[in-house]
């Protein structure tokens, strides 16, 4: 893992259908008791989503439902569109 600015980045890893990014140890809902799992897609509380940023993909997670994402990591995937990523590419 490397850093792209202030965002942790994966280089040649995390490509859709390849390596998995593990979110299972992170509580998806900071406002609820216990440790909830994330759901893929969308931007609300407990959601993990992917957007295309230039020729890379930015993985974002929200744990409290506000407009700011609490976790972001960049996948330097050489232009793979964010829409290529599915829930199965992550351990939620």
Image: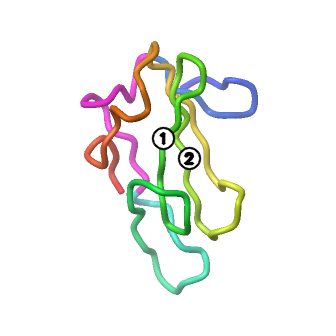
How many C-alpha atoms fall within 10 Å of the one at disc 2: few (<14), some, or many (≥20)? many
The x, y position of residue 1, in whole percent, is: 53, 26
Find out whether residue 22 is within the magenta segment.
Answer: yes
Q: Answer yes or no: do the residues labelled 2 and 1 have beta carbons within 8 Å? A: yes
Q: Quick check: 34 left or right of 8?
A: left
Q: Quick check: 42 left or right of 9?
A: left
- Residue at image coords 75%, 26%: 5
Q: Nearer the viewer, residue 57 or 9?
A: 57
Residue corresponding to mark 1: 50
Dot 1 falls on a residue whose secondary structure is: strand
The x, y position of residue 23, in whole percent, is: 43, 53
The quarter of the picture where residue 65 lies is: bottom right
The quarter of the picture where residue 53 lies is: top right
Q: Give the magenta part as a residue range.
A: 12-23
Query: Gap between marks 2 and 1, in whole Å?
Result: 6 Å
Q: Which mark is residue 16?
A: none
Q: Which mark is residue 60?
A: 2
């Amino acid at each position: 893992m490397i850093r792209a600015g202030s965002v942790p980045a994966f280089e040649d890893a995390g490509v859709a259908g390849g390596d998995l990014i593990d979110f299972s140890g992170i509580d998806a809902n900071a406002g609820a008791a216990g440790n909830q799992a994330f759901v893929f897609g969308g931007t609300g509380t407990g959601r993990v989503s992917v957007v295309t940023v230039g020729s890379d993909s930015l993985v974002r997670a929200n744990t409290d439902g506000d407009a700011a994402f609490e976790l972001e990591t960049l996948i330097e995937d050489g232009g793979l569109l964010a829409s290529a990523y599915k829930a199965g590419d992550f351990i939620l």
